[in-house]
Amino acid sequence: MNVAGNWRLQQQRYRLVGEECEKCGTLIFPPRDLCPECEAPAKMPYVFSGQGEVYSYSTIYSPPRGFEEFAPYTVALIRLKEGPMLTAQLTDVESDKVYIGMPVEMVTRKIQGGDEGNPIVYGYKFRPAHLG
Amino acid sequence: MLKPDRPVGIVGYGAYIPRYRLPATEVDRIWTNGQGGTPVREKAVAGPDEDVVTISIEAARNALARAGEVRPSLIRAVWVGSESHPYAVKPTSTIVAEAIGATPYTQAGDWEFACKAGTEAFQAALGFVGSGMARYALVVGADTAQARPGDDLEYTAGAGGAAYLLGPAEESLAVVEGSCSYVTDTPDFWRRAYQRYPSHGGRFTGQPAYFKHIVAAAQGLMAALDRQPSDYTYVVFHQPNVKFPQTVGKQLGFTSQQLAPGMLCNEIGNTYAGSSLLGLTAVLDVAAPGERVLLVSYGSGAGSDAISLLITGAITERQGRAPRTRDYIARRVEIDYATYVRYAGKLIM
C-alpha cells in the first residue's frame, strides 16, 4: 500500500479533476501537465462532468491482489462525454447487463478497503446513467 | 428554543440510498425458521464498495446540485453525523469535503450521537450560519447500520444518508423557524469501543427512551413557536420500525396523512443517523411553497432534536435538479441472506 502515491492521485480519483490545454483547448485525463495534442504545457485544472459511455468491457473473476473483495466485477474503457478515455470499474450493475455504448455516470466508491491495517482507497467508478 | 439572529434555511438537500434490499423474511427464515414477525418489509444494504463516506459524497453532491450556483469553496463546514464512520481515527468529513471540492479552508468534523448525530450537526450548522461566521455549511446524517446477526435489530438496520446545505434564508427552499432539543442520560442502546455490534435494552428502548424524548422535544418546540400539530402539512420522526413513528405521531396529535410522505422505514429500514433526515428529503421532494414540516429525530443515549421548517417558493424549481428519494427507493435489487452477509462484512475471512 503506497499511502503517498494514492494521496497524490486524490483529486483525479475523487472527482475527475483533469487538465485543459490553454494553447489548443484539448481536455486531458488523467492529468499529465503536457498536452498530448500540441505538446504545450497544460496545468489548468478541469473538472470532468462524469458522464460517458462504455467503449469496451471485461468481467474479472480472478482479481489481482487487493481487489478480491469486489470480485467478480466488470472493468470498462469509458469514453467521457468531453472526449478522453479512461479505465474504471463498473458498479451497481450485473455483468450481463453491460453493453458497448451503455451510458454511464461517475460515482465515488471504495477502490480498495479490505485490509484493516491500511487506509481505505476511494476513487471513481461508473454506474448506469440516471441510476440505471 | 434555538433560533439564530440571522434567518437560516436549507439551500440544497440530497438523498442517497444503496440499491440492494434484504427482505425481512430472509432474516426470519435464517433465525426463526420463518416463525417470527417482521417489523419492516425490507431494508437497504450497502454494496461491497460503499460505506458512510461514499453514501455521504453522493448525498452531498445531490444537495449541491439542488443548491445551484453555490461554489463549494464557500462552504465553511462539512460535518458528517454517523455511528458507522469507516475509521475509528481519521475523519469521514475530510474525505467528503475533498470529494465535493470544499477543501482546504473549511471546518470538517465527524459527529456522534447514535441516530441523531445528523440533526445535531444540523443544529450546529444553524448556529454557524446564523452567527454570520459561515455563509454555507454542509451537514450529513448517514449510516451503514450495524446489527448483531439474529438480533431484533437485524431486520431493520439499513444503509443510507441525507445531506443538507444550510445558508441564508433568502436563498433557501425551506426556512428554519426554530429548533429544540431534549436530552437525558438514558442507556437504551450502546456500543462499547472495539465492539462490532451494538447492544440494547429491549423494551426499555420504547417508553422511557424513544417516546419520552420525541414527545418532549416536539411539544417543547411547538409550545415555543405557538403551533399546533394541525399547523403542519408534514411530520417526520426517527424511524426504527414502522410502529414507533405511527404511535408517537398519534400521541402528539398528528394524522397518518401528515406522517405518510416521510415514512420510508418499511422500504429501506432504519438508516440510523440517516433515518429522519432521509424522511425529510422525501418530504421536501413533494412539498409545496407555504407548507410547514416538523422533523423530530431520536438518538439513543438519549435525546431528540425537533426542527420546524417553512417551505419557500424556491423549492419547486430545485426538486428536480437531483434524483429524488423515491428514485433511489425504486432502484431496487433484492438479495438473499448469504449475499447480505458478504456485503455487510459479517463474513470474517
Image: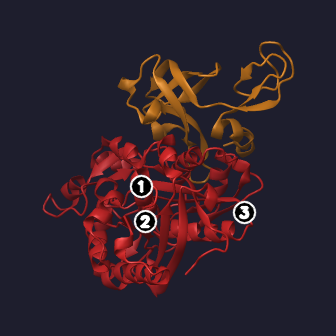
| Mark 3 Cα shell of 10 Å, populated few (<14), some (14-19), many (≥20) | many
User: Residue type at mark 1?
Assistant: Ala
**Could you tell me if the residues under marks 1 and 2 are in contact, i.e. CB atoms within 8 Å?**
yes
Q: Which residue is mark 3?
A: B134
Q: Cα distance, mark 2 to mark 3? A: 25 Å
Query: The residue tagged with tag 1: helix, strand or loop?
Result: loop
Q: Earlier in the sequence, mark 1 or mark 3?
A: 3
Q: Cα distance, mark 1 to mark 3? A: 27 Å
Numbered badge on residue B293: 2
Q: Earlier in the sequence, mark 2 or mark 3?
A: 3
- Residue B272: image quadrant is bottom left
- Chain A: drawing colour: orange
User: Residue type at mark 2?
Assistant: Val
User: Residue type at mark 3?
Assistant: Ala
| Mark 1 Cα shell of 10 Å, populated few (<14), some (14-19), many (≥20) | many
- What residue occupies the far left of the structure in this picture? B35
- Chain B: drawing colour: red
Q: Nearer the viewer, mark 2 or mark 3?
A: 2
